[in-house]
Image (cartoon, grey):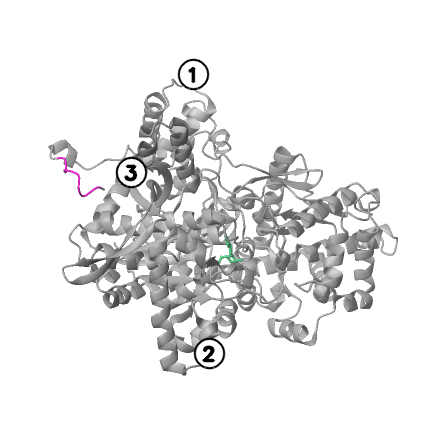
Amino acid sequence: VNPGAARPTHPLALAPVVSPPSSVDGFVKQFLTNLNFDQGVSLSESDANDQYLALAGTVRDYLMARWLEDQARQNEQQSKTVCYLSAEYLLGRQLDNNLLAARLTDIATDALAQCGIDINDLRELEVEPGLGNGGLGRLAACFIDSLATMSVPNIGYGIRYEYGIFRQTFVDGEQVEQPDAWLRMGSPWDFPHPEAAQTISFGGRTETYDDNGTERTRWIPDWSVLAVPYNMMVPGYHNGRVNTLRLWRAVATNAFDLRIFNSGDYEESVRAQTFAENISKVLYPEDSTPQGKELRLQQQYFFVSASIRDFIDTVLPADYDLTKLPDRVIFQLNDTHPVIGVPELMRVLIDEKGMEWDDAWAITQQCFAYTCHTLLPEALEVWPVDLLGRLLPRHLEIIYRINEEFLEEVRERFGDDMLRIRNMSIIGEHPYRSVRMAYLATVAGAKVNGVAELHSQLLRDKVLHDFAEMYPDKFTNVTNGITPRRFIRLANPSLAELITEALGAGWTIDLERLRGLEALAEDPEFRERFGAVKAANKRRLNEVLFQRDGVHVDETHMLDVMVKRLHEYKRQMLKVLHIVTLYDGIASGRVAAADVTPRTFIFGAKAAPGYAMAKRIIHLINAVGSVVNNDPRVEGRLKVIFPPNYNVTLAEKVIPAADLSEQISLAGKEASGTGNMKFALNGALTIGTDDGANVEIRQLVGDDNFFLFGMTEPEVEVLWAQGYTPADFYQAHAGLRGALDLISSGAFSEGDRSVFEPVVSNLLYDDRFMVLADYASYIAAQERVDAAYADQDAWTKSAILNVARSGFFSSDRSMRDYIDRIWHTPPVL
Ligand code: 475
């Protein structure tokens, strides 16, 4: 991949790479070869980790020929490539996904059995690469899966964090974070390419110089690090294609430590090494509330600069005419994290390639597109001008000039409207001078998209209103999606088999075919089999959770599941109030236990380590759980399970077992949600607000198969404008009063009233996300859930209709929308 290097000329070097034979014997042979020659052990001496690594290596060997072919084919055809720039990829385990894609699952299972190994034992050894926080990172992983499956040229660019999202444990019910040393036992899925490293510079100053009569600028940085790419295979499903995920790792440059080393300061030189390598050390665990930390900006520039230059210098041919760059690439910005790429491409084109500003800007504006993932004002990234100027002085100059020309355009269009200019400026002045990254992305991008219909509409009408007025054609929507390979085929093999039996195998790459299940919802025999799948998935979950955490799931219970990051806007508190209300009813004797639908509540949620309220809510959930689970009065009726360290691997077991999907954010706050789609496609019914993609789910599955509650977004606005007083709702609703009073009384904190006082006070006196205002409506909706669940057959019918009507939420469809509306990148066949 290094065009500068001399090409080998030996005839053998030109022979195509061949895959090992697709047979059990072929697999055994390759596996043993890898065990011996890569792991350096004999079969009899090997331990399970050796075997796992050799197995992974074998799967890689089968994919290698296709990978190399694809790269050659894409180069030859000069195809346009989607460069997806994302600071996060929440991949989940790789082994099963890659076996499935390459049709090797059965062969590998038999081959290992011949070697006396149960492949299931090896599966459990894989530590998932948790290189993301939540929705945004998982979306990136689904998208690259779909692009590979659709044969669309794509390179996913990101960071190879040494530590991914923290491992969550509970100590006395409180979250404790542990480092995620996911690389400790080896990383068989990636290939380092030190020869393709890029040097990434920081700091210093700029100066102008005379270049044959034209004044030009150059950047004289004062330190740099190496970005070393690690390539991962992204195999398409059953199509023989393999795309690339290229993650960058920071390594100290030679120059860096040599300079200090020569000065004789050995210690200092080792320190310098550590300093450089810190850049890719750890994923920031803040989801939705980025902190303005310098290291984070270093991470962003590090991976974006490496990626853009990698594409230009090593993917494109050496003599490529860069004025045609938009024919070959679209850089998709996954939120604002990679937006520093905009001034970086400008700098490369102008300072390094000698282009004029206007030409460079015209190219840049065609090469980027921006996806926004939020509506929360505190989640919109801004960088203090001081910090950005210190770290990237040339980039700040370029941003200033972009802003100047942009504001001139605003003036031409709308006149000298001071307030409008202040509001639209890429540089904010209050409370300190800062660069507004979302605005920069909007001005520079060819397109700007939200991630669900409602979200995109709110972006146009509110968050980016002035920009939408100025550039109406830039704005578009692409509703999120999820990959049916991982989240149905792999996560729910029993359902997948049932569907294939009913509809044939094509649904996995054409999810709209699930419509064919609609008719079967009327068939009692099919309903029975569908119900049996759900029951089996509950038993499987019971086994997993018993193994993992020593807890039992009762398969006769309704499984009521809320899994997602812990955030106030997502309103886990509303779920807690529901549970406490039910508990209070039985414990006080007002409600007969026998009249309560037996339910097991499952939570999964990590809180950002610095988010105190979120951590208190986690503590409260665990505290309520330990009281409820140990009170004989509610035994067999209510149970609360909160397995620690919710991640993709656990999601794959929890979601297929769920009956009820909790999607209960305050309307107007959840950009889309993607968990909501996974549940619907696995036959859970949703209880949800009119928010994010819930809106589209409900439209598709129908009101009869969805439990809607809560204020709409316009109603939320009206209540805010009137002045929201949460205590009024407390006064007005006895059930709510009972629940909050019970929490206040210390019933869940061994009588200590102070422990959860901040949670209760926050709801009574502030309640930014209007939990109390939606309480009554939520409880009423839960009563409708109970009534519906009482008729199991009708419930199953609704569940089938949820599956049948949710094919729209395949990430293959999302990719088609991006391709049609934004990228214009045809498949390369
Ligand atoms: C939305 N993460 C979901 C999902 O579009 C949506 C922010 C800052 C720093 C690090 N991570 C983040 C997010 O903002 C995020 O995950 N957003 C989510 O993106 C995919 O479905 O509604 O909350």
> In which quarter of the view is residue 799 placed?
bottom right
The answer to whether the residue labelled 3 contacts the one labelled 1, judged by CB atoms less than 8 Å apart, is: no
The correct choice, above or below, for 242 with respect to 549 in the image is below
For mark 2, give the secondary structure: helix
* Left or right: 458 in relation to 19: right
First to last magenta residue range = 2-8
Residue behind mark 1: 45
The mark that comes first in sequence, 2 or 1, is 1
Magenta stretch: helix, strand or loop mostly? loop
Residue 798 visible here: yes
Amino acid at the residue labelled 1? Glu
> In which quarter of the view is residue 113 placed?
top left
For mark 3, give the secondary structure: helix
For mark 1, give the secondary structure: loop
From the image, which quarter does the C terminus lie in?
A: bottom left
Residue behind mark 2: 418
Residue behind mark 3: 64
Comparing 243 with 163, the one in front is 163
